[in-house]
Image (cartoon, grey):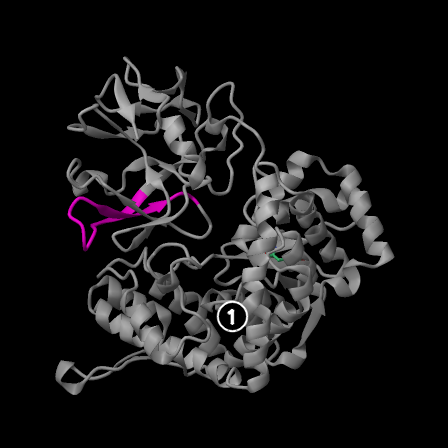
């Protein structure tokens, strides 16, 4: 094999990434030597197939000559609201190590080229601890909170551990002696935090590489509470096929298609690294025209856009490709010792962790006004359908700007507003209601609407045009301090809604204080003096 030029290396390092900070810095290093970088993962919940995205990039990095370290950030798993309890850290770390290695092997990555490091092996040293204190001495609470906002679970009044988490992640760059850190785009705020603060400690500013977050199969986020939205690494072939069958996959739509995305960022790059002649095959009986073969991802995308490849066929091919990736992992996990490890690390541990978490969360819910606890955000309805089992309900996919993708939300609007009026509409969503099932479909929030007291006319509340997706509503004179999930027993939403209305000029208010987002007021289209709910 001929050696790659620095430019070719950069191109491979960069492909399929969503964003790179410090590209010039990387290019300069590549002109002289190979790049050192690391990817960290906190051993919390069980890894799912979304993890193939960073794994595929790790394969690219190695191919480009990079020295890659994988960090099992066990201390971070604990600092993040004790997602892994202290006495489970070791087991979870072992479980992660086994799964991550199985995934890498499955896509043909040679493990002996990688360096594996466990966080606490150096993060408890005197030197590191002293650096943590130095970091604490120069970091503002504001910056620490902001840095962790998308990664670490933060209550209204965040735990100290949640604030320290990003500081340690920044320091890891120095202690792992890297030029760059790689992670999902959800890590972006921690990365920019590191770029800002590391030089203040006298350390180098590192480059940062970010992969896109893959959407869940329903075009919504990969959520642990909706098992069908994600494929588990140990799902059997039939389950994979069933989940893929249900995936969001609209004929001709190549912009919003979780299956194409997975083929693009995982299947093709991973397969073709080890097998340059890899082809994507859609098995079809002779009477429907026989197998279809694609040499590149682009061919699949083009065929799908031109409606020459039908969703049913794309699903069959993708399910087969995913099963091929998972088969070696299933085989590895038939091992008795690994089955036991999985039970020990996640069996009773999850129940135990919940018990530990409870008091922490309660004490983190301070005595603030109910209105401050609400998290109302601007969202856009990217997909909407009638509920299959209820004629008064719609099932929407609402983009709230979350890195995990759109959320599924069920609303009782079908008798009031035609579906066509809602597609692509920007709306306000109460995002921190406890998820609940409505006729079998889990709803992860509530779209806010105004109505006349007899409920004959219902209109959505409209955010002002200045507001963007993801922005939150605030109320002057009240803090914005949302709790992660509103306590259903306390009826927080109902109590607030009782004091909300659309006033005589059509503006949504809470006790006469307008709802403000993006610098403008929230309004109903035509209703005045109406209720909000
Ligand atoms: N923040 C990463 C884990 C991580 C922890 C420490 C690091 O140094 C790097 C990465 C995650 O969300 O999983």
Residue at image mark 1: 56
Q: Is residue 36 visible?
A: no
Residue 492 rendering spot, x and y as whole percentages: 43, 33
Question: 140 or 450: nearer the eye?
Answer: 450
Place residue 34 in its image quadrant. bottom right
Q: Is residue 477 above or below residue 11?
A: above
Q: Is residue 258 left or right of residue 265?
A: left
The quarter of the rendered structure image containing the N terminus is bottom right
Q: Is residue 492 left or right of residue 188?
A: left
Place residue 286 in its image quadrant. bottom left
Question: 266 or 378: nearer the eye?
Answer: 378
Residue 385 part of the magenta segment: yes
- For the point 65% across and 37% down, the residue is 143
Q: Is residue 199 left or right of residue 381?
A: right
- SS category of the residue bearing label 1: helix
- For the point 52% across and 67% down, the residue is 47
- For the point 42% across and 73% down, the residue is 268
The quarter of the rendered structure image containing the C terminus is top left
Residue 422 rendering spot, x and y as whole percentages: 23, 40
Q: Is residue 148 above or below residue 334?
A: above
Residue 531 rendering spot, x and y as whole percentages: 27, 23
Residue 355 part of the magenta segment: no
| Badge 1 density bin: few <14, some 14–19, many ≥20, Cα 10 Å | many
What is the magenta range?
Answer: 381-401
């Amino acid at each position: 094999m001929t050696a790659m030029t620095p430019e070719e290396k950069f191109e491979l390092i960069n492909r399929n990434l969503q964003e790179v900070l410090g590209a010039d810095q990387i290019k300069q290093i590549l002109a002289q030597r190979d790049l050192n970088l690391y990817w960290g993962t906190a051993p919390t919940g069980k890894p799912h197939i979304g993890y193939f995205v960073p794994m595929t990039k790790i394969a690219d990095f190695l191919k480009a000559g990079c020295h890659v370290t994988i960090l099992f950030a066990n201390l971070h798993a604990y600092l993040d609201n004790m997602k892994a309890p202290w006495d489970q850290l070791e087991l979870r770390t072992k479980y992660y190590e086994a799964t991550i290695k199985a995934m890498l092997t499955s896509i043909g990555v040679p493990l002996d080229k990688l360096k594996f490091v466990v966080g606490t092996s150096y993060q408890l040293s005197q030197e590191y601890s002293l650096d943590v204190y130095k970091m604490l001495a120069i970091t503002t609470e504001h910056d620490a909170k902001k840095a962790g906002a998308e990664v670490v679970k933060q209550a209204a009044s965040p735990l100290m551990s949640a604030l320290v988490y990003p500081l340690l992640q920044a320091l890891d760059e120095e202690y792992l002696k890297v030029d760059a850190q790689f992670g999902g785009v959800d890590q972006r705020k921690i990365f920019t935090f590191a770029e800002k603060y590391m030089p203040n400690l006298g350390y180098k500013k590192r480059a940062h590489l970010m992969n896109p977050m893959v959407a869940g199969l329903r075009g919504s986020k990969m959520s642990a509470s909706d098992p069908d939205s994600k494929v588990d690494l140990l799902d059997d072939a039939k389950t994979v096929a069933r989940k893929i069958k249900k995936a969001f996959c609209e004929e001709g739509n190549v912009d919003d298609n979780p299956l194409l995305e997975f083929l693009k960022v995982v299947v093709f790059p991973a397969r073709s690294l080890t097998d340059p002649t890899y082809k994507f095959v859609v098995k079809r009986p002779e009477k429907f025209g026989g197998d279809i073969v694609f040499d590149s991802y682009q061919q699949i995308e083009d065929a799908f856009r031109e409606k020459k490849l039908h969703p049913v066929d794309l699903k069959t091919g993708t399910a087969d490709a995913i099963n091929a990736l998972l088969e070696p992992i299933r085989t590895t996990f038939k091992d008795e010792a690994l089955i036991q490890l999985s039970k020990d690390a996640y069996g009773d541990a999850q129940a135990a962790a919940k018990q530990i978490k409870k008091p922490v969360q309660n004490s983190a819910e301070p005595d603030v006004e109910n209105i401050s606890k609400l998290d109302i955000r601007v969202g856009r309805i990217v997909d909407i359908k009638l509920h299959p089992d209820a004629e008064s309900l719609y099932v929407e996919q609402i983009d709230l700007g979350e890195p995990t993708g759109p959320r599924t939300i069920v609303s009782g609007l079908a008798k009031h507003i035609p579906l066509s009026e809602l597609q692509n509409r920007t709306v306000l969503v109460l995002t921190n209601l406890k998820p609940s099932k409505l006729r079998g479909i889990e709803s992860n929030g509530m779209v806010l609407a105004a109505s006349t007291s007899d409920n004959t006319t219902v209109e959505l509340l409209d955010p002002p045009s200045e507001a963007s997706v993801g922005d939150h509503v605030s109320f002057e004179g009240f803090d914005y301090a949302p709790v992660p999930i509103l306590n259903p027993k306390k009826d927080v939403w109902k109590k607030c809604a009782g004091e909300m209305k659309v006033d005589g000029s059509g503006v949504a208010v809470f006790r006469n204080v307008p709802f403000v987002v993006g610098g403008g007021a929230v309004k109903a289209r035509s209703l005045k003096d109406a209720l909000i709910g």
